[in-house]
Image: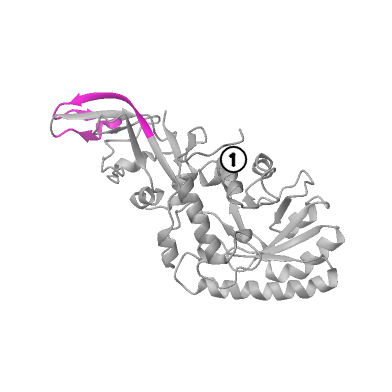
């Protein structure tokens, strides 16, 4: 059956590069949301814990529960709290959410510093401190998210300046409301290579997986993709000139040709439309015709093929981003580590 291979050496190399950039691994919070960007939540959490990462970021409480014994700090982005577990911290995106969350929860207020997607408005900061104190909430941190850190424009810097102003106001407010020592974080993968101040934490996702598209730092060019998709041969046949392959017969043999089907299709996350882009695998094999639900065709009779080892190449062929390619990989695909690693399963 088709499977995903995780390169432990590449993953640790990327984390080393990030730790060197920010000066310590202790500030790294690995983003593991959405099945660790398709890499496998539990597997990548165990690898990260082995490396020495103590902080994680997930989408939901369900994800947090799967890895709660591996990290001393887990930031839950959807902000929905059903437990008071001490290592769970909930992102607050609105005043309404601040009013509704369980008063015993650990919270982190997200500020909309210019992305205009999620987060409390900058002019609602005073109100949010008042409500948090009145409701007895444990305010742990203030954070934001940058909208254009991966683009070589000045937008990152005016948004960062907004957050610096929010940080100053938060510290002033905290002298009145006395929540204890407040933490601050703003950098995502792209921003950590562009900003001089990494505050108390960096939320590292796509960079750790070696798929950062931006070239705003020489270090980003050295990052290594961690994930590759492999498929195994189902059957082989010889096409005669003029015979066509698969649904719609969209590939026609120009001469006698050996072709094989392999057990990865769009149900596994291999995009159906790749044939339109004339995509070729790392071994220069072109996908022949439309990708089926559970299989694809290639002009080879190899027992196994690597369909891609850098999701950015697939994304480029489809005019999208690597995130979309990897998060759509099926959770049912077996994921294995390319080097010896003892998993607690």
Determine if the magenta segment contains residue 242: yes
Magenta-highlighted residues: 231-254
Tell me if residue 239 comes above or below residue 67 in the rendering: above
x then y, percent, for residue 330: 49, 36
Mark 1 crowdedness (10 Å alpha carbons): few <14, some 14-19, many ≥20 = some
x then y, percent, for residue 9: 47, 48
Q: Secondary structure at mark 1?
A: helix
x then y, percent, for residue 256: 14, 29
Determine if the magenta segment contains residue 314: no
Task: Tell me what residue is drawn at x 65 percent, y 52 percent.
Answer: 54
Q: Which residue is mark 1?
A: 42
> Which one is in front, 98 or 23?
23
Tell me if residue 90 comes above or below residue 275 in the rendering: below
Hey, which quadrant is residue 284 in on the image? top left
Question: Would residue 137 appear left or right of 51 to someone viewing this image?
Answer: right
- What colour scheme has been applied to the protein in the rendered image? one colour
């Amino acid at each position: 059956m088709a499977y995903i291979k995780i390169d432990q050496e590449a993953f640790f190399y990327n984390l080393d590069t990030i730790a060197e950039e920010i000066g310590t691994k202790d500030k790294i919070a690995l983003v593991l949301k959405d099945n660790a960007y398709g890499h496998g939540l539990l597997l990548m959490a165990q690898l990260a814990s082995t490396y020495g990462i103590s902080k994680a970021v997930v989408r939901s409480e369900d994800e947090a529960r799967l890895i709660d014994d591996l990290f001393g700090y887990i930031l839950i982005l959807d902000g929905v709290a059903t437990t008071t577990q001490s290592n769970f911290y909930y992102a607050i995106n609105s005043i309404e959410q601040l009013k509704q969350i369980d008063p015993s929860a650990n919270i982190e207020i997200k500020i909309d510093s210019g992305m205009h997607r999620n987060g409390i408005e900058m002019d609602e900061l005073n109100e949010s401190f008042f409500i948090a104190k009145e409701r007895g909430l444990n305010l742990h941190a203030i954070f934001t998210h940058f909208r254009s850190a991966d683009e070589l424009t000045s937008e990152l810097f005016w948004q960062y300046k907004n957050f610096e102003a929010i940080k100053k106001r938060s510290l002033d407010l905290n002298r009145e409301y006395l929540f204890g020592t407040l933490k601050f974080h703003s950098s995502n993968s792209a921003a950590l290579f562009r900003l001089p101040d990494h505050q108390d934490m960096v939320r590292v996702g796509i960079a750790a997986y070696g798929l950062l598209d931006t070239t705003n730092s020489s270090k980003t060019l050295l990052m290594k993709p961690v994930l590759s998709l492999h498929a195994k041969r189902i059957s082989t046949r010889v096409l005669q000139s003029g015979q066509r392959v698969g649904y719609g017969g969209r590939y026609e043999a120009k001469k006698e040709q050996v072709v094989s089907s392999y057990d990865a299709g769009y149900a596994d996350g291999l995009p159906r439309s790749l044939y339109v882009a004339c995509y070729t695998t790392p071994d220069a094999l072109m996908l022949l015709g439309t990708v089926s639900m559970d299989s694809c065709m290639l002009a080879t009779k190899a027992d196994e093929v690597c369909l891609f080892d850098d999701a950015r190449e697939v994304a480029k062929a489809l005019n999208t981003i690597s995130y979309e390619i990897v998060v759509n990989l099926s959770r049912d695909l077996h994921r294995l580590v390319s080097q010896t690693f003892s998993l607690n399963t």
